[in-house]
Image (cartoon, helix red, strand yellow):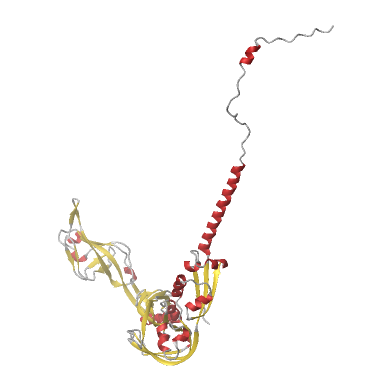
Amino acid sequence: MPAPEKEPVQKKYPEKEQAFTYAKSPFKPISTKPKDKSWFKKWRVIGTVLFLAVFSVTAVTLITFRSSGVELILTPKSTMSAVNKSVVLSRAGSANVVEFSTLALPYPMSGSFASGEKKSTESKAQGTVVIFNKTSKDPQVLIASTRLESPEGKIYRIPSMVTIPGTKVENGKTVPGSKEVDVVADKAGAEYNIGLTDFTIPGFKGSPKFETVFARSKTEMTGGYVGNSQIVTKNAVDIAVAELVVEANKNLKNIILKKLPEGSMFLPGSEEFAVLGVETNPKMGAPIADGQKFEVKVNAEARGAIVKETDFAKTLLKSDIDPAALGGGEMRIKNINELEIKLSGYKFDVASLRLDVKGNADVEAAVDIDEVKNKLMNNRIGNSGDILSLFPAVSRADLTYHPFWAGSLSGSFLDPMSLGHIDIQIISR
């Protein structure tokens, strides 16, 4: 049989359930859904783009400032002129006289040379000793030629009179007086070449001073010799110096040209190698071993005369060339070394001289690079035509910007011309 159905359970106190029904809250419930952050992403992208744009502009600006530049090649105006004139030069200078000056550059030379000469020679050994005085507080005088004797009986002499101080007391102890003295062997010969040793003074033998006044070596005795040997003769030294002079003269003019002051012109024929002093090692007259060379050192100067090249050209070409034809400024002679130039009355210490010049002079306007650069920095220059109008001494101007677009910055604070980033070259025709 099927089980009987149960009756539904009746809830007790239904009115209480109704009493505990909550009213709706006036506040909006907090959402648990994730927020939409798309607006934040958009602004972050915009900020990144702006930062990169500012950074790029700044980087380009810095690169332009550092690397941009102007290359300017200038060709000065030039002309040819036949010259056959004499020009007077003076150290003082005047209205119609070109001022000149002299240049002296240190130019030492040295070398090793063989003597090749032999002769019978002899020399005495020499050295330094310290003479002590333990006798008393009184000084001891030793006359010239006082003898000093080694334990082997070798005699050495004092060349001149010396005074040996007396004893003194230091920290309660008596200290003997002493003095360094150079001595020379009594005779020539290698047997007087000895090492460090003590010496007595034979002149005091038999008196208490023989024990209290004595000497000790400070150096060995050396240089004693008797026999045939090579020696450093005056003739050998003169030959060595002559060889050094010949060698120096080969490069003398180039040495002077490398040291010329800017804007100066060297006067051909004025170059001179002046020997001021000579040193030899060993000294002249000293013996040297067979096959050994002696050293020669020459203290010398490279000398020459110079003039300011624009002053010289102006005086030499006066009445031959109209300065206006070359821009109205100074001029210079490009091929001065190709002209026939003769100096008359020149010596290193002379007050005035004459210069005879003959030949075809290649003359061009003198363009000062520093002056050009200063004018370019202070004037707005846009093209080569502006440069030609600013510099009448120039016949051609080639202007190039690096990088090429830097030319568009003309007049701005990044203009390489205004910044002085200018490489100027002077190219002669």
Can residue 55 be spotted in the picture?
A: yes
Q: Nearer the viewer, residue 397 or 225?
A: 397
The N terminus: image quadrant: top right
x and y percentages locating residue 255 in the rendered image? 43, 78
Where residue 29 appears, as percent x and y from the top left, is 60, 29
| Total numbered badges shown on the rendered structure | 0
Left or right side of 57 for 152: left
Can residue 117 be seen here? Answer: no
Q: Is residue 398 above or below residue 92?
A: above
Horizontal relation, residue 274 to residue 334: left or right: left
Location of residue 170 in the rendering, given as x and y in whole percent from the top left corner: 19, 53
Residue 150 image offset from top left, x and y in percent:
27, 64
Q: Quadrant of residue 278?
A: bottom left
Q: Is residue 102 above or below residue 46?
A: below
Query: Which of 141/350 is in front?
Result: 350
**Compared with residue 346, is residue 109 higher up or lower down, i.e. above or below?**
above
Q: Residue furthest right?
A: 1
